[in-house]
Amino acid sequence: MQPLKFAIFGTGFWARFQLAGWREVGGAGCVAVYNRTVAIAKAFAHEFGIPAVYDDPETLLENESLDFLDIITDVGTHSQFVAMAAAHGLPVVCQKPMASDLETARGMVQVCAEAGAPLLINENWRWQYPIRQFKQALVESNVGRPFRAHIRYANSFPVFANQPFLKDLEEFILTDIGSHILDTARYLFGDARALYCQTQRITPDIRGEDVATVMLETESGMTVVAAMSYASPVEHDRFPETYIHVECEHGAVELSPDFWVRVTTRAGTLARRCPPPHYAWADPAYDLVHASIVSCQANLLHALQTGEPAETNGADNFKTMQLVFGAYRSARSGQVIQPATL
């Protein structure tokens, strides 16, 4: 099979790692890059040996013969660039969060469906190796029906240091890490029929919320509590690990610090460590996350090559967006929200 040709829109913090992910997977090559500041685009292209550079996105799409487009720009531009790709009938991979509001996300799914252009979302969190191993243990262990779960992402990592623009977001943690954590909740436990959320701002010089707690009632009747914080100096302050504990009829399954998966039944506890793979190009502070990019993009590439749905396609990720923006609506109103009605 011939390698697929793609272009990258955006050359910010995450672009080099997503490009490294594609190269790790193989089967696709970047032939062009766009950035509104051409000097930045040229520097990126020179560093990674990309032959064509543009400071106008439409010109790139008109001039280049592409198999798909990878959008890694800020969220406010996602819908514009997705619509451009759809107008060219071009499959598009879009960085998360899909959009900055629910109606825009709905429009992105619709415009791609009408154009027959697949929309794939680069939602990598659920692809973390420890999380995949946790789900396997939950499914295969003899612990019975799960009825309650806690997902905790709480640390004091200085996230604003390398991404200072996050300080200015009116809506921060639920769109940033919440889109990951709530998507992981859906992956593990299914869709939610109701949710309730409370948010707080602890860091004084930011505009949005840096703490959020979301309680979900899943369609299977589970209670899932997702706690998120960038303002918590905790004992196991191991950014960017996610801790999960699930109570079941006949036992419990846990993903605990340092990638340990534990299964407890009345017979005792079995534990095994499930560390992620390491790649030389990964930022050590983001090693866990960057490793998951490879697994996610392998799935996206398979979808692009075969026409099969990606696990994190636009229609599926829209359900995650319903949770994210439903959580904001709940936090503002103090009411329980039914995400599917939004």
Image (cartoon, rainbow, N blue to C red):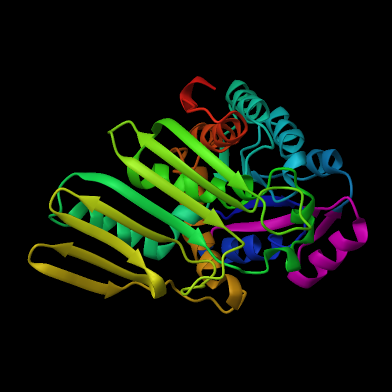
Image-based side of 226 in relation to 69, left or right: left
Would you place residue 335 above or below residue 134 in this image?
Answer: above
Residue 213, x across and y down, in percent: 50, 47
Going 41% across and 47% down the picture, which residue do you hit? 225
Would you place residue 56 above or below residue 84 in this image?
Answer: below
Image-based side of 307 in relation to 136, left or right: right
Residue 194, x across and y down, in percent: 42, 29
Q: List the single residue furthest toward the left.
A: 267
Would you place residue 5 above or below residue 61 in this image?
Answer: below
Magenta extent: 27-53
Position of the C terminus, as image quadrant, is top right
- Nearer to the camera, 75 or 244: 244
Is 36 colored magenta in this rendering?
yes
Is 75 colored magenta in this rendering?
no
Q: Dividing the picture into quarters, in which one does residue 115 lie?
A: top right
Going 82% across and 69% down the picture, which residue do you hit? 46
Q: Dividing the picture into quarters, in which one does residue 306 lie?
A: top left
Going 83% across and 38% down the picture, which residue do you hit? 58
Going 44% across and 53% down the picture, which residue do you hit? 126
Residue 335, x across and y down, in percent: 52, 27
